Image: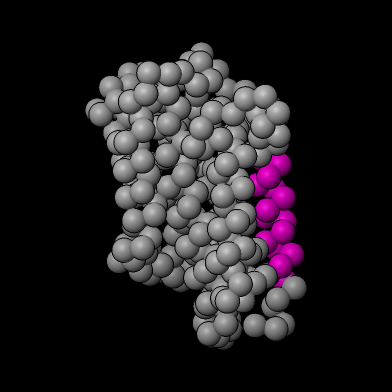
């Protein structure tokens, strides 16, 4: 029964996001436009055609943005307005709000991933085995968990007046130093190898180029996920008495 309540809360969040034009513009519209403009370059990146690299980058850009930027602002605002406190007065489990936000993030990231991958196939004419499409899509999709967890931590930690610039700075640091917009090389690549965003891209391009999954990349992504889940748990517990 309690799980049904959590799922109902997640469903309500998904419906709200579907009506949010700003959310749709930045998670679906912007990645699509950028891909249509820049994908068809006569270049290579990480052993694959630039169009394939940029497909993964733009799908990740949209999915991660939806999981992080929108959620941080929304969580901070709802905390200030007392919505989270009201939910705690219901029979729902204490973690229902956080779980519902993460479920909604995972669900609403799917359109951005699917649409950009379809553009890669039919606009840029990228060809690969069906299982590779699935692995790439799932890799990006699971990567949104990292940013959904970070969104909870940042949304709880900052008030609505300061959360947006903090979220934007953090997100673009991961975007730039993870190489979502352009392939990394030299010292920037060495630095980028510690970020989860870089490895989401490299796992996807390695699957496309060689059919292999770099174990180091999986470990880095898992480490960031565990770290952000721990951070979110700590912040939520620390703020529990003051919201």
Q: Residue at x 34, y 56 (%)?
A: 25
Residue 146 appears left or right of 211: right
Q: How many marks?
A: 0
The vertical placement of 72 against 239, above or below, is above
Residue drawn 43% across and 18% down?
43
Let me know if residue 143 appears in the view: yes
Can residue 156 be found in the magenta stretch? no
Q: Position of residue 216 (x, y in %)?
A: 69, 27
What's the magenta bit mostly, secondary-structure-wise? helix
Q: What x and y, as percent, mark residue 209? A: 48, 16
Q: Which residues are magenta?
A: 222-237
Q: Is residue 193 visible?
A: no
- Could you say which quadrant of the image residue 16 lies in? bottom left
Instruction: Give the image location of residue 69, x and y in percent.
Output: 51, 59
Residue at position x 45%, y 27% in the image? 53
Report the side of 80 relative to 37 (left or right): right
Q: Position of residue 170 (x, y in %)?
A: 62, 54
Give the answer, above or below, for where 14 lies relative to 207: below
- Figure quadrant of residue 108: bottom left
Q: Which quadrant holds the C terminus?
A: bottom right
């Amino acid at each position: 029964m309690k799980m049904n309540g959590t799922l109902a809360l997640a469903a309500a969040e998904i419906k709200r996001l579907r009506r949010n034009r700003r959310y749709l513009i930045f998670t679906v519209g912007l990645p699509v436009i950028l891909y249509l403009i820049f994908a068809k370059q006569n270049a290579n990146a990480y052993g694959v055609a630039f169009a394939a690299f940029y497909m993964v980058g733009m799908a990740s850009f949209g999915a991660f943005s939806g999981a992080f930027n929108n959620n941080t602002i929304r969580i901070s605002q709802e905390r200030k307005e007392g919505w989270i406190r009201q939910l705690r007065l219901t029979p729902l489990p204490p973690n229902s709000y956080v779980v519902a936000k993460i479920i909604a993030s995972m669900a609403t990231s799917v359109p951005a991933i699917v649409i950009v991958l379809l553009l890669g196939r039919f606009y840029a004419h990228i060809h690969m085995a069906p299982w590779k499409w699935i692995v790439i899509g799932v890799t990006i999709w699971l990567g949104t968990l990292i940013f959904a967890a970070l969104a909870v931590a940042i949304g709880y930690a900052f008030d609505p007046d300061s959360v947006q610039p903090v979220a934007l700075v953090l997100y673009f640091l991961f975007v730039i130093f993870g190489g979502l917009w352009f392939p990394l090389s030299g010292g920037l690549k060495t630095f980028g190898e510690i970020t989860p965003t870089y490895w989401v891209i490299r796992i996807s391009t390695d699957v496309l180029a060689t059919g292999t999954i770099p174990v180091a990349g999986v470990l880095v992504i898992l480490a960031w996920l565990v770290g952000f889940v721990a951070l979110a748990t700590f912040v939520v517990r620390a703020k529990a008495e003051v919201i």
